[in-house]
Amino acid sequence: MGMKDSDAVKPDGVQGKNVVLIGMPGSGKSTIGARLAGMLGYAYIDTDALIEKVTGRSLQKIVDDNGYLTLRQIEEKVLLSFDPIRYVVSTGGSAVYSRAAMAHLKTNGVIVFLNVDLKTLRKRIKNFGERGIAKHPEQSFEDLYRERFPLYVRYADIIIEGTRLSVDEICERIIEGLRSEKNRVAG
């Protein structure tokens, strides 16, 4: 049985605002995004899936054929071209490389960084080289983490420390953070 919109959680102060999830590959953006959308009564979109739909190619195929910088350019174009209302948006891990895209997402959205420690991410990501990650070919996962972490922190309105929490616990923390606009860090 699905949840009716009247059953959904309605955090004060964010009515109509999107919830935009950012974080490393393996941080749980897609899983958490789908669950959070149901809890809030919002629609859900995964921008990696949107990129694949728009281009007709997998992220890995784009990287293999045209390079990681092309994937980042396509990602920016796709993010700038859509204007969701009442969505939970799971972005690709590289969305934070585009100032323009992040500014666009922030105009009608609350940015939530799902922070998961490097050790846990490495356990979750088994197919690092085949996942369509927008990174320099010689860049290690650890180097990518170090490069992106400050960008995630810079754009985040809410930071969720999600390493040791369940999906539902993370969603609850996000909702608490949405209810408390004064909190910069939840978790």
Image (spheres, rainbow, N blue to C red):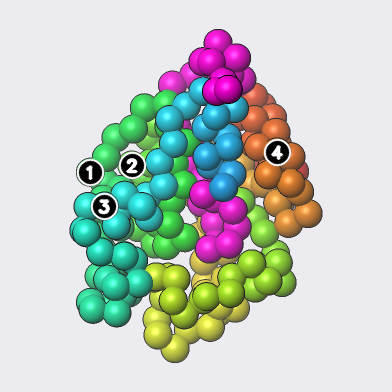
Q: Tell me the quarter of the picture where residue 23 sits.
A: bottom right
Q: Is residue 25 magenta?
A: yes
Q: Which mark is residue 53?
A: 3
Residue 171 image position (x, y, % from top left):
65, 37
CA–CA distance between discs 4 and 2? 28 Å
Q: Which mark is residue 104?
A: 2
Question: Which residue is depicted at the point 36% across and 44% down?
Answer: 103
Residue 127 image position (x, y, % from top left):
52, 75
Q: Crowdedness of circle 1 by 10 Å Cα count: few (<14), some, many (20+)?
A: few
CA–CA distance between discs 4 and 1? 31 Å
* 97 relative to 146, above or below: above
> Relative to residue 16, is residue 148 drawn left or right?
right
Is the residue under label 2 in contact with that under label 4 (CB below 8 Å)? no
Q: Crowdedness of circle 4 by 10 Å Cα count: few (<14), some, many (20+)?
A: few
Indicate the amino acid at tag 1.
Answer: Ser
Question: Which residue is depicted at the point 55% across and 11% down?
Answer: 6
Q: Is residue 36 magenta?
A: no
Count how many numbered circles sit on residues in the image.
Answer: 4
Q: Residue furthest front?
A: 1
| Residue position marked by numbered label 1 in the rendering | 81
CA–CA distance between discs 3 and 4? 29 Å
- Magenta range: 1-30
Query: Which is more N-terminal, label 3 or label 1?
Result: 3
Residue 176 appears in the rendering? yes
Q: Nearer the viewer, mark 1 or mark 3?
A: 3
